[in-house]
Amino acid sequence: MFIELDLQSEVPIYKQLADQLIEGIASGKLSSGQPLPSVRTLAADLGINLHTVNKAYQALKQEGFLEIHRKQGVIVQPGALPTADAAFRERLGRDLRPLVAEAVARGMKENELQTLITALYGQVRNPSSQGGAST
Amino acid sequence: MFIELDLQSEVPIYKQLADQLIEGIASGKLSSGQPLPSVRTLAADLGINLHTVNKAYQALKQEGFLEIHRKQGVIVQPGALPTADAAFRERLGRDLRPLVAEAVARGMKENELQTLITALYGQVRNPSSQGGAST
DNA sequence: TATCTGTTATACTTTATATATAACAAGTAG
DNA sequence: CTACTTGTTATATATAAAGTATAACAGATA
């Protein structure tokens, strides 16, 4: 897998994992219906506990990004992905707010923020344009 | 004060407090050099422990948003506020990334995100335009 | 000399995070 | 049917973060 964990980070492991899986879906590296490693396999692969993997899987299942079946294991949502509904936008706003506030307090202009968002949006959609040419 | 805490929130109290103080600075509700309540006063006011208030104050002092003197207590940075330097932008990018990623995964268009950022930017700078007319 | 300030120290509780084992139930492949 | 792998559940433990409760200290001030 393409997962890279920083065990020294203040960000919980299960959240790092969930974040990178979502980013995989956003970028297309993980396609609809694609099977993911079993909790035991991925745990061994990453050198962490299977419960930590399971916690990330469960969170993404709860959000609708994953489906979990008995023997087939875990697969990326084969149907319609979760949408940016009102509930999500509310949560997104709550999460973004303190970040925007500090940026404002530090004198960042609105267009600087927009530029950063644009850059991140691009990085997430096309991870290949990370350090190489934009081919 | 204008602080409102949600004790049931999953967001730590000290972070809610720090966030709202920063937002106060960003909006101008807290002006340069303005004194803040003592840790004991604010703690009693909010119904929380003085150490929780102190933790928020210390974090903002560490960032450069507050100055703390012996008897005068805590005041909003009277000199130059912290800037949006490289270190901050790096941290901001790291914090924004998973939020942008999920928005992308949920099919949000880039301009929808930009619109949300614009709205938050406005709310933070002018909290009065919250539920009333844009006068 | 009191009083108020931030600060430090100690102790305790609760919750979140992460790991370690073990076992169970449901599919699937032999 | 048997064996294996799957997610799932349960129990236990360890560590850290968050929050509270008290107490005491040192500096500045009225």
Image: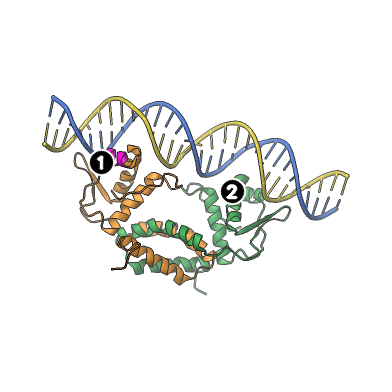
Chain colours: A green, B orange, C blue, D yellow
Residue type of the residue flagged with mark 2: Lys
- Write the residue at 32% across / 55% down: B23
Residue B121 lies in quadrant: bottom left
Numbered disc 1: secondary structure: loop
Residue C3 versus residue B15: which sits nearer the camera?
Answer: C3
Residue nearer the viewer, C16 or B130: B130
The quarter of the image holding the C terminus of chain B is: bottom left
Q: Residues within 10 Å of mark 2 (few under 14, many from 20)?
A: some
Residue A117's place in the image compared with D14, above or below, is below
Q: Are marks 2 and 1 in contact (CB under 8 Å)?
A: no
Q: Amino acid at mark 1?
A: Ser
Whole-percent x and y of residue B98?
A: 49, 59
What residue lies at 29% left-to-right and 59% top-to-bottom? B27
Q: Looking at the picture, how far across and down is residue B77, in whole percent?
A: 23, 51
Image coordinates for residue C21, horizontal then vertical, percent = 67, 36
Of labels 2 and 1, the one closer to you: 1
Q: Which residue is mark 1?
A: B38
Extent of the magenta region: B37-45
Chain ID of residue with mark 2: A
Specify the label residue A55 is tagged with.
2
Q: Position of residue B15 (x, y in %)?
A: 38, 47
Q: Is residue A70 visible to the viewer in this orientation of the structure?
A: yes
Tell me, yes or no, if residue B83 can be seen here: no
What main secondary structure does the magenta stretch of the protein show? helix
